[in-house]
Image (cartoon, grey):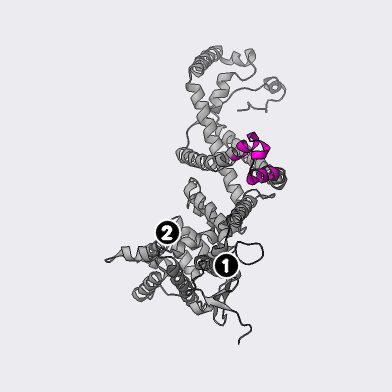
Amino acid sequence: LTTEWVEGTRLDGGTFGDEARLCGLALNGYLTMLLDTGVLHADPHPGNLLRTTDGRLCILDFGLVTELTEEQQYSIIEYIAHLISENFTAVPGDLGRLGFVPAGKEAAMEDAGVVKVLAEAFSRLASGGGAKALSSAGGNKKGGGVDELGAELKAVADKWGNLFQIPPYFAYILRAFSVLEGIGLQCDPDYAIAQECYPYLARRLFTDTSPRGKAALREMLYGAGEQEALNVKRLTKLSGAAQTFREVVADGPEGAAPAVSRASSEAAATTRRTATSEMADILLAPQGSYLQELLVKEGVRMTDVAARDAIRAAAESPAGKVAQSVMQTQRDAAAALGPARRLVFPFPLPHELVDWASPILSERAGDDAVRESSQELSDLVLGNLRPAADRLASAEQRPASGASDTDEDTLEQLPQLVNQYGPGLQFAANSFRVELIRLAASRMTEANRPEVSFPLPVVLMEQDQPDVKQIP
């Protein structure tokens, strides 16, 4: 049935100069259908993808669709996270939930080496793609396109048919994204579809509040272990991709960026500011977000390591060595007093406090990784803040007549930004304080050793209350 006639040009046959943008918009639309709505348009041949006369994307003919359950959607997200974090031990379970592996065959599939083959195929798709990559593969090497992935999946199914199968819904997914990749390659010979999926995936992970979505984000940023260090490079890539999402999907007449051929620098700047604002909304949400929670905990870990490093450095300084010598004299004096020490000094001496706290200050497994992440994150933050700080400083020093419109806008928006993000900053600061106290309490518990103790001023109570013991 024809419900509406739409004037437009095939997306693969236009010469308007904005085909690459519309192809990116189409890809994000299909990702939204795949992982959000659960109803995927499964017939995206070039004739069904049009550029309308006003520069918008039109998808025709929803006569063929495939549906995905929420379980399948999250299984796809988890599978992607496990591949990116190289947690291959979780892959068999993912493939089972996605319908690639019959129930009970996961272990046999892993033993047969199927997981390794599939991991290599999807890894090539994630890092490759594009005519340039395919032509440079040469020989017996394989490229990283969707068609190549489909061929490899079919080969795996043919070889291990009793262990592996391609579910019908996934065949439709491969078909849809293969067509989108083909159109993308016509616009750009170096088009890599997996890289183009990053903006949507990043935004989805940053805004997903479900337990499975949070777990996928954490695994992508930290890896499979509980104590893995933050992967700052991956965080940077995801953050940049999340901001790019706004630029990719900007379309239509309602305030979004126009087609590339008609785009102005002002419109592009507005889109970038909107993307940055949306990222700030996630990081500084008034009630917090999971990304904020992860970064707050990482900040506490970095503060912990930096504080212990500073204290140890102070102890090794000339003044610190003098203090250690004095405390050693106190130790010797306290040992000489024996049991009388409690009566002469019924309060903890400095050396006793230091001895008690020494376990808290010791080097811990993973500290080097935290230091490395801290340096990378510091360089990233300072690199992003320095240009903005320089612009503000120059705007304040420049005479009013010489200030640019951008500088004036920035200064005028400061009160609004403070009002907008003040509650989020306060929430993040409170979260940081609570997490820091929690870590300090954990360290104090670790230091609560029976062999390291000092008397507190409760000795006078012990005569009347024999059951009151020395507080370690």
**Image quadrant assignment for residue 465:** top right
**Image quadrant assignment for residue 468:** top right
- Residue at the (67%, 21%) spot, across then down: 457
- Neighbour tally class for label 1: few under 14, some 14-19, many 20 plus, Cα within 10 Å: some
Compared with 345, 116 (above or below) is below
Residue 32: assigned label: 1
- Residue at the (44%, 59%) spot, across then down: 83
- Quadrant including the N terminus: bottom right
- Secondary element under disc 2, as helix, strand or loop, is helix
Is 8 part of what is drawn in magenta? Answer: no
Cα distance in 3D space between marks 2 and 1? 26 Å
What x and y, as percent, mark residue 180? 48, 71
Depth check, front residue: 106 or 314: 314
Mark 1 or mark 2, which is nearer the start of the sequence? 1
- Neighbour tally class for label 2: few under 14, some 14-19, many 20 plus, Cα within 10 Å: some
The extreme left residue here reads: 139
Residue 102 in the figure: left or right of residue 244: left
What x and y, as percent, mark residue 446? 55, 35
Residue that carries the numbered disc 2 in the rendered image: 88
- Secondary element under disc 1, as helix, strand or loop, is helix
What x and y, as percent, mark residue 312? 50, 26
Residue 39 can be seen, yes or no: no
Compared with 238, 102 (above or below) is below
- Residue at the (58%, 56%) spot, across then down: 268
Amino acid carrying label 2: it is Phe
Depth check, front residue: 158 or 13: 13
Depth check, front residue: 351 or 422: 422
Depth check, front residue: 331 or 97: 97
What x and y, as percent, mark residue 313? 49, 25
Amino acid carrying label 1: it is Thr
